[in-house]
Image (cartoon, coloured by chain):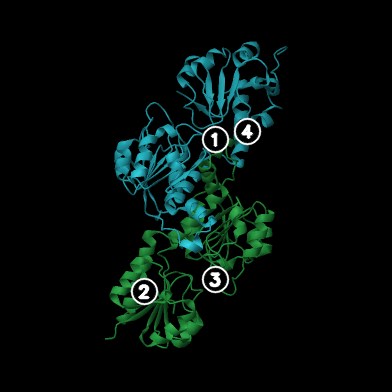
Chain colours: A green, B cyan
Amino acid sequence: METLGVLLTVPMNQYLEEELDSRYNLFRLWETPPESRLDFLRAHAGSIHALVGDTNVVADAETIDALPRLEIVSTFSVGLDKIDLHKCRERGIRVTNTPDVLTDDVADLAIGLAIAVLRRIPQADRYVRCGSWKAKGNYQLTTKFSGKPVGIIGLGRIGMAVAKRAEAFGCSISYHSRSEKPDTNYKYYSNVLDLAANCQVLIVACSLTPETRHIVNREVMDTLGPKGVLVNIGRGQHVDEPELVKALVEGRLGAAAIDVFEQEPLVPEELFGLDNVVISPHAGSDTLETCKAMADLVLQNLEAHSSSKPLLTPVL
Amino acid sequence: MAGDERRPPELRPLLLLRPSPLALSCLSTRFHLLKPWDSPLPLPAFLSAHAAAVEALLITGLIPVTADTLDSLPSVRCIVTTSAGVNHIDLSECARRGVVVANTGTVFSEDGADYAVGLLIDVLRRVSAADQYVRRGLWPITGDYPLGSKLGGKRVGIIGLGNIGSRVAKRLEAFGCTISYNSRTKKPSVPYKYYPNVCDLAADSDALVVSCSLTSKTHHIINKDVLSALGKQGIIINVGRGELIDEEELIKCLMNGDIKGAGLDVFKNEPSVPEEFLSMNNVVLSPHSAVCTNEVSQDLIHLVIANFEAFFSGRPLITPVSA
């Protein structure tokens, strides 16, 4: 039986790469310069049956078209925005992702970022390290987190996990979602502007689709206001980034804690000088434990596929 | 009764020992504030001249109250401190002289708990270190920041399950942590496992949160043995007092990789912080600001006023502490 040929788009996890290499025929896309990638794909198209990608590089239309023998796309993420699902559906290509195993970590980071930016933890750390505590005295007063009204965009697995954590801090929870969820007591707003008007900490936790692109736009930020805090653990494209920068610099938005950006790893440099911002390098699920669990899920899905067993976490 | 009208509270004299902007702006309409720093007289002379009859003393900024302090204020009967901790006040001397003392009760507790949780997440998930990494422009150059460690499922040992500790516990439970604790005595109505011995607690914990008060019994409660029991994967968070931890031992353990990381809001010789910490990226440092929020300031002033008004009206203090 033919060994599965697996295309790994980026070196996202050493353990995963080693396991793929030992079990299958591994093709490492990043070792080819970008301008030669299509040629590389075409050269090996006959041997590539599976593609493993991450939040930045997965399977766009061009890639899928170059791989006529592609049977399965297994993404090292829960987000599917970098996969041309329409094409996969057309071609009958299976798609799996890594839900659930990363829910806790992402929700933990969302709350950790909210506390960090309200309480200025990174800024206070720098204040101590550069000698200002000795030279200038106490750090400024910051803003309390407990009890603040929290609004969540997207009440899926991650959104619910964020809500559960925020409740332990006495925060009231409201949300905006495609549709109201029948089994929660949280207040639902059918319009994201109404949500922004009724919360102080707005957390983006929905999936990225054409409908949710720039769901946090200038108007939402202005509504959230000078005391409002935006936390983005979704995708960079959920937020109008140039408008975010302007809103923060001009004080129309109080603060922001951002884990995802429109052009990762590039971050608007204007943010680097701001004290009302916490910047995180897309680390939502970046723990040893969770990355191993995600890698195992990718491997288990590929294993199931190659032994014609049911996939563990299929999307298509 | 004739001639026995209660003096309006705003005229009652209240002694401050240092200029606190909050006290000065909020208390001057309610009390006659005595401000030694405005006087050309040295403090002892000022106190003899102006404060011999003063009954009420407001302590801000953790200024110590010793037997000598009390000697210089023979009429003081009520001390209110703007802190939760009272290790800077000689409580037994106060008790001996019939001086009642009030602290901040639970006004700080939520903020303190929030901060402890924030520090723990920061250390485990490298929030501050990664923020600095990106600001230095390194993300496009050296790639993703090293992986952190998952909070969910971690065993957290809380030292001091008081106002702050109990709120830390409640918060961390929502993250899927297992909570155990050490306290002076076992609390009968809490669902967490009690460890009478701190070393045993440390041995069974992935992270320790220190939130107890500093007394002669808890000085260096976190010592070499406890840090060793905590182990190489262990994290320690301190929002209590610097002297609860043997700071030199902690530094050694961090430098040798004998524990994994620390989040420290308090130090032995504030605002001096040992240089060794400054180059560690597995430590989050904080300038004793765990409870310093705008919201708390308002609550604090109301409580200070309420305590002094209770005293002047002959009622029990709102948030008394005892030796």
Pointer 3 chain: A
Can you tell which of label 4 and label 3 is closer to the viewer?
3
| Front residue of this view, candidates B137 and B3 | B137
Quadrant where the C terminus of chain A sits is bottom left
Pointer 4 with pointer 2, Cβ within 8 A: no
Q: Circle 4 — which element?
A: helix
Badge 1 local density, few (<14 within 10 Å), some, or many (20+)?
A: some
Image coords of residue A292 (percent x, y): 35, 64
| Amino acid at dot 3 | Leu
The residue that appears at 60% across and 20% down in the rendered structure is: B56
Pointer 2 chain: A
| Amino acid at dot 1 | Lys
Task: Measure how far apart labels 4 and 3 are at the Cα level.
Answer: 47 Å
Residue carrying label 2: A312
Residue carrying label 1: A134
Specify the label residue A208 is tagged with: 3
Q: How many marks?
A: 4
Pointer 1 chain: A
Image coords of residue A134 (percent x, y): 54, 35
| Front residue of this view, candidates B266 and B175 | B266
Can you tell which of label 4 and label 2 is closer to the viewer?
2
Task: Measure how far apart labels 4 and 2 are at the Cα level.
Answer: 57 Å
The residue that appears at 50% across and 44% down in the rendered structure is: B115
Residue carrying label 4: B302
**Residue B101 sits above or below residue A243 on the image:** above
